[in-house]
Image: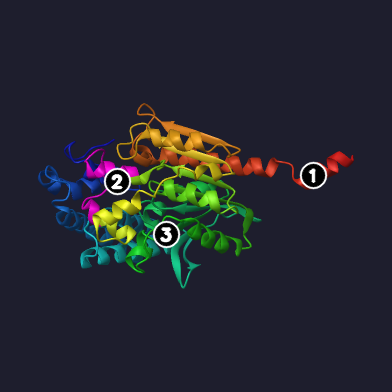
Amino acid sequence: MFEYFAKNNYVWNFAVAGTMNSRGRIDEVDRACRPLRDIAAGNEDVGTVDFLRSWTEMVDRLVAAADEDAAKGHRRTAGQAYARAASYLITAERMQQAGTTEREATYQRCMDLLEKSFELNDPLTRRVQIPFRDTTLPAYYTKPAVAGPAPAMIMWNGLDSTKEHQYLSDHSLELAERGIATLMVDCPGSGEALRKQGLTAQIDTEEWAAACVDFLESDSDIDSGRIGLVGWSLGGYFAPRAAAFEKRLALVVAWGANHNWGKVQRRRVEREGERPVPHYWDHVMWVWGHDNLDEFLTMADKVHLDGVVEKITVPFLIAHGANDRQIPLEYAQRSYDQAVNSPKRELRVFTPEEGGAEHIGLDDLGHVSSFVADWVADTFAEMDAAPTETDERVGAGA
């Protein structure tokens, strides 16, 4: 993994690597990071306010130049710059303590900049609201420019990512090029659903899946028989759990296996393995709606897939990095071994030699994204080619 800062600061280096794989440009990232090198040599929690300040200063200059380009009618240049600025802001926002006014303002600015970039550069993507309970789940919806009902993928976050991270990874554009729509969702515990609406995470994620499938089924442009679900990081628990119980899903992808997330929390208490964000325990209890660590850990013990993945009866891909320093590779193997009722299960391990070996492949996110997109497209195509019950009866009659 590209490590801009001292090697002992995994959390900051992971953030920078993610930005470089989400439309970041090395010169702009260097301008933001160079003043932080001495600060980054310390504890991962120290200096995150400085991180936000330095990255925001860089973004301010970038947005000012983009505004000038937009005024001149240079739509593509301006739109690209607004999207990069959003990528930098969501990186800096992710590093902050929960609930600060600065974090809230930064997130809102990020969303506003992405809306500008959609308007200028991406007519395929729009913001939508998915009905959920007595509220909604905010999402970005990318639909391919194809005729006829298209297959669709629901995309879910992990512990600390947002729908903005999903969009800026360009995975939805990869799927659109393959004729597949993408619904990028801020589920409870993530992004706007958490920050703006106070919705916290839960174990039974099939409730979220049902709301997402209902939304897609209401769109006549979508083939309701070909709706899949992909989740990265903690989504590697959320998505398989949902697919085990929401039987309208046609396939599922764990982009980073998370077979026993509760056990990972017990390991992190003992400082085993790396953590994804600064101020970790404040963040994780914010996501799950807890204010007592012992009570949180007791709840987290139930966040696992033992006895769950056996209930998956659709194609199931597990993509995991061989050098994942957050989630042990053995959990990917466990999900694969237990998914005995999936008609097409595959474990794909990305190695350091090829890239994509870190957590969710963030050292080479595009490499993993392309593989996942191809697997999804191939699997949907296989469904199209498979004979239906009607075909089989006609053939028998002949």
Horizontally, is 82 left or right of 37 in the view?
A: right
How far apart are the alpha carbons under marks 1 and 2?
50 Å
Question: Looking at the image, is 62 positioned above or below residue 240?
Answer: below
How far apart are the alpha carbons under marks 2 and 3?
21 Å
Q: Residue at x 59, y 44 (%)?
A: 313
Indicate the amino acid at tag 2.
Answer: Gln
Residue extent of the magenta highlight = 263-282
Q: Residues within 10 Å of mark 3 (few under 14, many from 20)?
A: many
Of the 4 image quadrants, the one containing the N terminus is top left
Indicate the amino acid at tag 1.
Answer: Asp
Q: Earlier in the sequence, mark 2 or mark 3?
A: 3
Residue position for label 2: 265
Which image quadrant for residue 260? top left
Closer to the observer: label 1 or label 2? 2
Residue 344: x %, y % from top left: 58, 37
Using the image as rendered, state which of residue 228 and residue 60 is in the foreground: 228
Residue position for label 3: 187
- Give the secondary structure at mark 3: loop
Q: Is residue 27 visible?
A: yes
Q: Residue at x 54, y 39 (%)?
A: 375
Which image quadrant for residue 3? top left
